[in-house]
């Protein structure tokens, strides 16, 4: 159950797009279409932003989109806004009712 | 409103025990699988345990297996986490997280977390 690999930080200016990658293995990211992404502001609980690789829960802006290729999943945020500045975590189902999270990526809106 | 509220955290000595609770309100608790997820200070999220909606399927991360026990009481809309043989590395904020009914494997509602500190 090794953590998924995410960049420690990414940044972008308002209005720009950024992509956060999440690399796992064939036992997690590559093996299941069950990757989810969570946004966490400092001192707050995580918020589900994307599930099942590409799906968005109601209430999540369509500026947030997910994708996957092989063992790597990605979260793209387009039209960056100041309130998008937060930590982002990917999470993958890893079989047998277990999950593995990524180490987290700090998004800075310049 | 729809929410999860954790309680039971605190300061405990290594080798000690704590029981966390998570109270669910304003949704049908028994319809959802649940998990505990923890976050050590300044660190990332770590999934630690899963329980099915009925409580008959349970799994743990290797880091807590044999020491922690997840359970639920659907009549009381509550989730529990019995933590024994606590270690310094168990120090973290513990979140209960609701399984998303639109997905087999995502968590759409989180509590505010309860802090567990293991220190002598």
Image: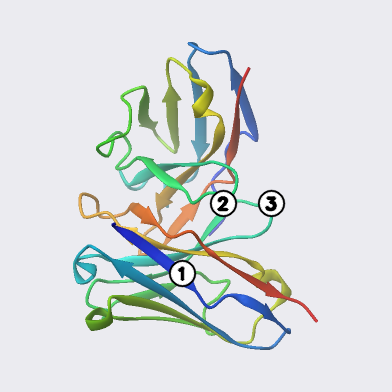
| The label number, if any, that marks residue A3 in the structure image | 2
As drawn, the residue found furthest toward the right would be B120
* Residue A30 visible within the image: no
Dot in front, 3 or 2: 3
Instruction: Return the residue at label 1.
Output: B6
Which quarter of the rendered picture does the N terminus of chain B lie within? bottom left
The crowding category of the residue bearing disc 3, from other C-alpha atoms within 10 Å (few below 14, some 14 to 19, many at least 20), is few
Circles 3, 2 touching at the beta carbon (< 8 Å): no
* Rendered image quadrant of residue A107: top right
Q: What number is the disc on residue A20?
A: none
* Circle 1 chain: B
Q: Considering depth in this image, is B18 or A93 the residue closer to the camera?
A: B18
Q: Residues within 10 Å of mark 2 (few under 14, many from 20)?
A: many
Image x and y of residue A75, in percent: 43, 30
Image mark 2: chain:
A
Which residue is disc 3 drawn over? B42
Quarter of the figure with residue A64: top left
Q: Tell me whether marks 2 and 1 sit on the same chain.
A: no
Whether callout 3 and callout 2 share a subunit is answered: no
Please tell me which residue lies in front, A26 or A23. Answer: A23
On the image, which quarter does residue A58 sit in? top left
Image position of B10 (left or right of B73): right
Q: Residue at left 34%, top 66%?
A: B34
Residue B118 on image: x %, y %: 71, 76
Assign a secondary structure to mark 3.
loop
Observer-side mark, 1 or 3, equals 1
């Amino acid at each position: 159950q090794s953590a998924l690999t995410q960049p420690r930080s990414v940044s972008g200016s308002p209005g720009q797009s950024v992509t956060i990658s999440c690399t796992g293995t064939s036992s997690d990211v590559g093996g299941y279409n069950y990757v989810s992404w969570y946004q966490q502001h400092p001192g707050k609980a995580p918020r589900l932003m994307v599930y099942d690789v590409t799906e968005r829960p109601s209430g999540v802006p369509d500026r947030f989109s997910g994708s996957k290729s092989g063992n790597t999943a990605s979260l793209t945020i387009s039209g960056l806004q100041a309130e998008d500045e937060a930590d982002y975590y990917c999470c993958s189902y890893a079989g047998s009712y277990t999950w593995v999270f990524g180490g987290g990526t700090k998004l800075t809106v310049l | 409103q729809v929410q999860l509220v954790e309680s039971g955290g605190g300061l405990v000595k290594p080798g000690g025990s704590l029981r966390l609770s998570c109270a669910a309100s304003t949704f049908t608790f028994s319809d959802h699988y649940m998990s505990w997820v923890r976050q050590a200070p300044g660190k990332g999220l770590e999934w630690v345990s899963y329980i099915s909606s009925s409580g008959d399927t349970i799994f743990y991360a290797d880091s807590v297996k044999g020491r922690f026990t997840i359970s639920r009481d659907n009549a009381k809309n509550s989730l529990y986490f019995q933590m024994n043989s606590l270690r310094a590395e168990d120090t973290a904020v513990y979140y209960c997280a609701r399984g998303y009914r639109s997905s087999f494997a995502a968590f759409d509602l989180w509590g505010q977390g309860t802090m567990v500190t293991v220190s002598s």
